[in-house]
Amino acid sequence: MSKNPKITDVNELNEMSRQIRRDIINMLLISKSGHSGGPLGLADIFTALYFNKLNINSEKPEMEERDYFFLSIGHVAPVWYATLARRGYFELDELKTLRKVNGRLQGHPAPLKTHGLPGIEIASGSLGQGLSIAVGCAIGLKLDKKPNHVYCVNGDGELQEGQLWEAIMTAAHHKTDNLTMIVDFNDCQIDGRIPEVMNLYPLKDKFISFGWEVFEVDGNNMNELMEIFEKTKMPNGKPKVIIAKTFMGNGVSFMKDDHRWHGVPPNPEQGKIALEELAPTKFGDFV
Amino acid sequence: MTFDLINPELKETRQGFADALIELGAENPNIVVLGGDVSGSVKTSLFKEKFPERFISVGIAEQDMMGTAAGLAVAGKIPFASAYGEFAAGRPFDQIRQSLAYSEMNVKICASHCGISVGPDGATHQSLEDVALMRVLPHMTVVTPCDYNETFLAVKKCVEVNGPFYIRFYRDKTPNFTDKNATFQFGKANTLIDGNDVTLVANGLLVWEAIKASEQLKKEGISARVINMHTIKPIDSEILVKAANETGLVITCEDHQKHGGLFSAVAEVLVQNNPVPMDYVAVNDTFGESGTMEELMAKYGIDKNAIINKVKKNLKRKK
Ligand SMILES: Cc1ncc(C[n+]2csc(CCOP(=O)(O)OP(=O)(O)O)c2C)c(N)n1
């Protein structure tokens, strides 16, 4: 496999996202600690971005023309690590070191400067901070009249953090149309369904009233994802948000749409069933 | 006091918090609990099951949680606001400073998952600065219990004092070794082991490590006093000055940065009264990382072995 494979065929993208799901399960089986639900639900979005949409080069992670990617919900790190490894940022074998001492694959993504994992711009783990950083980056790129696009992945529960709404205001105020925010809309957070813990809806109307352009998509449908990411690059003076309907734990029947899978790994038995459900792919496992 | 060093009972400190909270809830209808989407982890879900109408969910919004708690206190309630250490002290610091500390609101902040010992989650979740942040605030009482029993007592008793509290505890099971019927008084430290060559002033998780270190040092002919400094603010100056006089060497032990926590608090007392050689067992001005509790305590030098090494290294500094 080439170091930097871009995938254009939708079937192949789907196969890659299934492989990334298998990687997530295998990583968690080794680490025995970490989050299952969010990462599984986000595998398609990460695949779409990293294998098709982002302008990136895994051999030159810091190339000037790169699109910037920020993850505001650091707890879904396993999907990011698996995606980065599959895209060639580091060896697949390193996925075995998730959450291990002296490793680079920290429980929550660590900054490049301290842990040296390529492809990660800044630390993440404390919720609510990523969008401000993405907006700052987008403003900076505009000041330099650069064409790079900025992406930021946020959680829906995370949107209860006030800082995000400050950033949502700032983004619109500064007309950051070089920014695409993706909300992982799985309607789950740790303690239950979003409206049970703290109602957030109607979400679309909130973004519209804050001056954003809103797109809705099935976040577990590769065809839809391929299309939507083309639309969010329009230079119309507005920041864009994709409210991506996903399912927590998607791909594994007994985890699907169940908030109790937010923060726990599968045990060996559950892992075995999960890997049976997620059929092997041509890309092959790392274990 | 004797300790079962081989097979101590293991219990979660956060369970001590939850159990005390349920007793308080039954005793006092003004007790209310705020939840920030971590009620399972910090175990306030148990209070919620018993007293659903007195459990107030605020979502993932720690700054809002502290403000809401202040408002509840204005309305005559006794709010318990709970989150992981970093998000209980760090994230809402200014809200705590103005609306709780400066305004002297009767709000009890209970921080779970503190210190590097929270392990695999990594540096973002390892609150190593929270004691420093809370300790500099006027009016704030800061308590760092060392086990299940002491966490239970601290939580039960904090409502007897009107004013803001910060109570710090952990996620994992740890030895439960203090006497549950012991007298527990905020600001009054307990001497757990007597000794005259050196004093180990420990808090939280490190009290157990200090006990183990003292027992081992005893076999090597070194007599190490162990003081459990459960309240770091207001600090028990009297016991510290006496220990400095009598042992001439003080080593502090904590699961926290060396700056601003117990090391600083003890040094502040001793420089004003009786400066003696001091050293720290604490995280040395660095962020943590993922790993197991044991691995990290060894790597970052905050376990029994680190204490023994520091004692031996410093004994020769004694006058
Ligand atoms: C500031 C802060 N508060 C609390 C937490 C603990 N926490 C981690 S993930 C999470 C729930 C996030 O919900 P959501 O964004 O919907 O993610 P999902 O459950 O879908 O993975 C919480 C409360 C945190 N990491 N940071």
Image (tube, coloured by chain):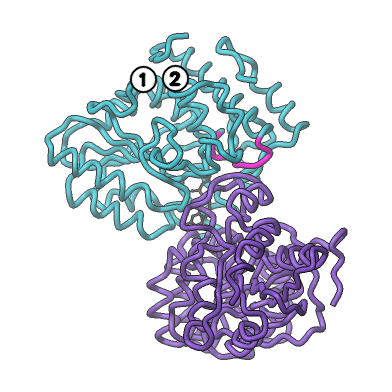
Chain colours: A cyan, B purple
Residue lying at 64% horizontally and 53% vertically, measured from the top left: B297
Q: Secondary structure at mark 2?
A: loop
The span picked out in magenta is: A31-39
Which residue was labeled with disc 1?
A: A59
Q: Is residue B300 above or below residue B82?
A: above
- Nearest the viewer among B20 and B259 is B259
Q: Chain of mark 2?
A: A
Task: Name which quarter of the figure residue B85 lies in.
Answer: bottom right
| Position of residue A254 measured from the top left corner of the image (x, y, whole percent) | 69, 35
Amino acid type, residue under disc 1 in the picture: Glu
- The answer to whether the residue bearing label 2 lies less than 8 angstroms from the nearest atom of ligand 1 is no
Whether the residues at callouts 1 and 2 have beta carbons within 8 Å, the answer is: yes
Which residue was labeled with disc 2?
A: A88
Q: Is residue A81 left or right of residue A70?
A: right
Amino acid type, residue under disc 2 in the picture: Gly
Residue lying at 62% horizontally and 74% vertically, measured from the top left: B53
